[in-house]
Image: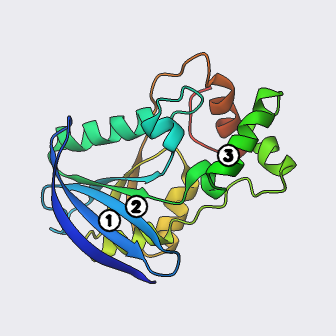
Amino acid sequence: MSVVFVAASQLPTTFGVFTMHGFLDEATGREHVVLSLGDIADGAPVLGRVHSECLTGDVLGSLRCDCGPQLEMSLDRIAAAGRGVLVYLRGHEGRGIGFSHKVRAYALQDEGLDTVDANVALGLPVDARSFDCAAEILKHLGVRSVHLLSNNPRKKEELVKAGMPVTRVVPVVPPHNHENVRYLNTKRTRMGHDLPG
């Protein structure tokens, strides 16, 4: 892998004071962010989240997805545990299709397509993400295994395949709203996410 550590600093947040780590994927030019709390290199399983960048959900407060609430819940749980790590993967917008394509897909969803069919209608993959980079970053930080905060079985599979053991999966299910019910149902029924029906 071509992921290299750049620097680390303290980051005070509303959830607590984390250590922020910068990583650069030299192959893609993407800069990834990690927030860690406590000793994550002591050999014990670490409560961890691998979070895909979502500008609309994480920053703009979109109700169309559950990304922003999952990010906040994960940071809150890590802070409550006093130990954990969140890997924020840049370049994962729209499950890896990019922001402009995501807006196009949203326009098709406005016309009635679900998130899977919208991507397919644009000739794009349903999910173009890779989580290998996250496994490499976790290894660099000395993490031996994770209690993975996720509803997506594919994340666990890819992390394990890339050499990062997942000792258990911890669901992250924020309350749904009237705007994202169909989106969450699509993730559950068509993408295999572990979400309540």
Q: Which mark sits nearer the N-terminus, 2 or 1?
A: 1
Q: Secondary structure at mark 1?
A: loop
Q: What amino acid is at disc 1?
A: Ser
Q: CA distance from mark 2 to mark 3?
A: 30 Å
Residue designated by label 3: 102
At horizontal 20% and vertical 63% (from top left) the residue drawn is 44
User: Looking at the image, do the residues carrying marks 2 and 1 touch, with CB atoms under 8 Å apart?
Assistant: yes
Residue 142 in sight from this viewpoint: no
* Figure coloring: rainbow
Classify 10 Å Cα crowding around label 2: few (below 14), some (14-19), many (20 and above): many
Label 1 crowd bin: few (<14), some (14–19), many (20+), radius 10 Å: many
Q: At numbered mark 2, what does the secondary structure look like: helix, strand or loop?
A: strand
Residue 121, x across and y down, in percent: 86, 47
Q: Position of residue 65 (x, y in %)?
A: 57, 33
In the rendered structure, which disc, 1 or 3, sits on the residue that comes first in sequence? 3
Q: Which disc is residue 145 wearing? A: 1
The residue drawn where x is 34% and y is 41% is: 74
Crowd class of label 3 (few under 14; some 14 to 19; many from 20; radius 10 Å): some
Horizontal side of 145 relative to 63 (left or right) equals left
The number of discs equals 3
Q: Relative to the observer, which residue lies in front, 178 or 157?
A: 178
Spatial CA distance of label 1 from label 3 is 33 Å
Look at the picture and state if 159 lies above or below 92. Answer: below
Task: Residue 114 in the image: state x and y as whole percent.
Answer: 77, 35
Q: Residue at x 23, y 53 (%)?
A: 84
Which amino acid does the dot numbered 3 rest on?
Lys
Label 1 or label 3, whichever lies nearer to me, is 3
- Circle 2 sits on which residue? 166
Q: Does 166 sit above or below residue 113?
A: below
- Choose between 101 and 119: the one closer to the eye: 101
User: If you read the primary sequence from the N terminus, does the residue marked by circle 2 or circle 3 appear first?
Assistant: 3
